[in-house]
């Protein structure tokens, strides 16, 4: 009996030890880490990375698990010694330069990372390169009543979390990525934390999606818009809505409050579906051409009035001064500008005839430029006369009218040189948007006068001149 008891105890201890070994092996995995601290743009090889065992709970999202996945790739960011190599950190080594975020920001814009309360506003299926609208939701302690409003429209997404390209995002249901996820369970954030949200059966495979822990999206915004976003983020909650890839129009939307919820949605009877405003650089004597396409989205004809399409206004005239005063209930397209005209939407044109339900028409119009003006935003609007602006801000276009002897700096910083040569010494640097007086020209160089009256030469590629 004693010998049997000792044998049984030994067998139990052996089984327990074997189970511990098996459990330990099951809770560990191998990931690729850096052997030493590596700077950005380092090409990864077996000499600078290695496989290392870590516990499952220590594995970072998107960590590389095989040397073959990283060899020959270049780092886009610095990596510390023993730090896990993440696939978003990698780029093809044959790329001559690894782009930084600053390289992706369009001229005149600023990159701003915004924390969204719910990234799954669009199911987490937002990617760099998409365009979104941003909605702010505020409570009554902030604005006096519970209210939501469309803060920004047509905003470029530069990055999702730390991913600056679609290729860096994980793919839904992609066998090539080695992911074990299926289309039926997509991890996305919710109010209570991470969970698996069913994906519609119609969602195609290989669709990029934001990782479940993602809360930030980096947007390309104007400096003024960045100020508003900062306030909205501190005093309210932000949502984004993804726009169609080819739609660049902007709509006039009234803020919603709790009383709005019980009111039926008012569907616009007409819609602008395309806009062209050309040219973007003019001089006195040129004509600004406008082309606006409108669709009747209602079940009744849209009645219209004059002036007929093709009518030419002279800068400074308005529809009212030209005897085209509003007729209530009639529809017209209009062109507005940012502070250039005292009259709201001064240039208006009729549809060329009543527009039948479901029909589409394109209206052309012209404006004769008689005075110089600085860079100004122009946009198209749809008006149900006399004062209901159904749609506005469509096709926002920057237009500049310059005198022949004036240039505008079109790059972040333009070098002013002592002579018309790239080898000449640099006298000064002028910032984007600076006005320069042109006093001469030599081939592809312009002789200019600086604001402090010094004279120098600027390459033609760095400036915009009248008619250019």
Image (cartoon, grey):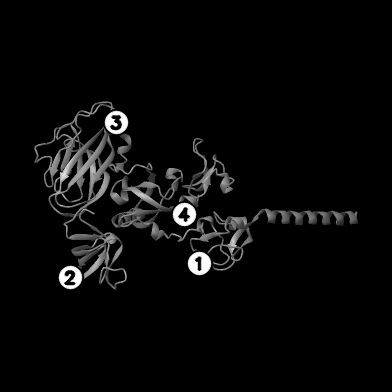
Check the image and report above or below for 133 versus 450. above
Q: Earlier in the sequence, mark 2 or mark 3?
A: 3
Q: CA distance from mark 2 to mark 3?
A: 57 Å
Q: Residue at x 19, y 29 (%)?
A: 353
Is residue 320 shown left or right of residue 194?
Answer: left
Frontmost residue, 180 versus 369: 369
Read off the residue under disc 2.
Answer: 453
Q: CA distance from mark 1 to mark 3?
A: 57 Å
Q: CA distance from mark 2 to mark 1?
A: 45 Å
Check disc 1 and report its element: helix, strand or loop.
loop
Read off the residue under disc 4.
Answer: 163
User: Residue 312 appears at what percent x and percent y?
Assistant: 14, 41
| Within-10-Å neighbours for mark 2: few <14, some 14–19, many 20+ | few
Check disc 3 and report its element: helix, strand or loop.
loop
User: Residue 224 appears at what percent x and percent y?
Assistant: 28, 56
Read off the residue under disc 1.
Answer: 39
Q: CA distance from mark 3 to mark 4?
A: 39 Å
| Within-10-Å neighbours for mark 4: few <14, some 14–19, many 20+ | some
Read off the residue under disc 3.
Answer: 297
Q: CA distance from mark 1 to mark 4?
A: 18 Å
Residue 138 is at least partly visible in this image: no
Check the image and report above or below for 435 versus 263. below
| Within-10-Å neighbours for mark 1: few <14, some 14–19, many 20+ | few
Whether the residues at callouts 3 and 4 have beta carbons within 8 Å, the answer is no
Frontmost residue, 335 versus 365: 365
Q: Earlier in the sequence, mark 3 or mark 4?
A: 4
Check the image and report above or below for 455 versus 195. below
Q: Earlier in the sequence, mark 2 or mark 4?
A: 4
Is residue 236 shown left or right of residue 420?
Answer: right
Q: Quadrant of the C terminus?
A: bottom left
Q: Residue at x 52, y 60 (%)?
A: 74
């Amino acid at each position: 009996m004693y010998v049997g008891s000792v044998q049984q105890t030994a067998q139990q201890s052996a089984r327990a030890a074997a189970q511990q070994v098996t459990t330990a092996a099951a809770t560990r995995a191998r990931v690729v880490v850096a052997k030493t601290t590596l700077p950005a743009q380092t090409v990864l090889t077996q000499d600078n990375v290695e496989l290392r065992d870590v516990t499952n709970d220590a594995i970072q999202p998107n960590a590389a698990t095989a040397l073959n996945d990283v060899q020959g790739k270049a780092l886009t960011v610095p990596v510390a010694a023993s730090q896990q190599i993440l696939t978003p950190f990698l780029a093809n080594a044959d790329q001559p330069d690894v782009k930084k975020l600053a390289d992706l920001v369009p001229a005149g814009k600023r990159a701003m990372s915004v924390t969204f309360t719910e990234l799954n506003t669009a199911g987490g299926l937002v990617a760099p390169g998409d365009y979104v609208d941003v909605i702010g939701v505020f409570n009554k302690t902030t604005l006096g009543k519970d209210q939501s409003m469309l803060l920004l429209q047509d905003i470029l997404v530069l990055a999702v979390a730390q991913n600056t390209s679609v290729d860096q995002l994980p793919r839904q249901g992609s066998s090539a990525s080695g992911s074990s996820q299926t289309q039926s369970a997509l991890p996305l954030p919710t109010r209570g934390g991470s969970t698996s949200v069913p994906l519609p059966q119609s969602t195609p495979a290989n669709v990029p999606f934001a990782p479940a822990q993602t809360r930030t999206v980096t947007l390309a915004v104007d400096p003024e818009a960045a100020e508003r976003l900062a306030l909205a983020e501190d005093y309210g909650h932000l949502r984004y809505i993804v726009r169609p890839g080819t739609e660049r129009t902007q709509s006039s939307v009234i803020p919603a409050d709790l009383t709005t919820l019980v009111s039926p949605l008012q569907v616009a009877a007409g819609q602008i579906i395309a806009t062209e405003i050309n040219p973007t650089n003019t001089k006195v004597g040129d004509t600004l051409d406008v082309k606006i396409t409108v669709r009747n989205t209602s079940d009744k004809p849209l009645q219209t009035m004059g002036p007929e399409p093709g009518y030419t206004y002279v800068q400074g005239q308005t529809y009212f001064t030209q005897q085209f005063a509003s007729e209530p209930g009639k529809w017209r397209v209009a062109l507005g500008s940012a502070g250039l005209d005292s009259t709201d939407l001064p240039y208006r044109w009729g549809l060329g005839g009543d527009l039948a339900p479901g029909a589409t028409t394109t209206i052309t119009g012209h404006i004769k430029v008689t005075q110089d003006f600085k860079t100004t935003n122009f946009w198209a609007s749809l008006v149900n006369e006399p004062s209901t602006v159904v749609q506005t801000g469509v096709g926002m276009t920057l237009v500049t009218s310059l005198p022949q002897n004036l240039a505008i700096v079109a790059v972040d910083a333009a070098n002013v040189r002592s002579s018309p040569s790239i080898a000449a010494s640099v006298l000064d640097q002028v910032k984007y948007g600076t006005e320069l007086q042109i006093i001469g020209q030599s081939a592809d160089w312009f002789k200019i006068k600086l604001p402090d009256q010094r004279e120098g030469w600027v390459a033609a590629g760095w400036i915009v001149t009248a008619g250019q």
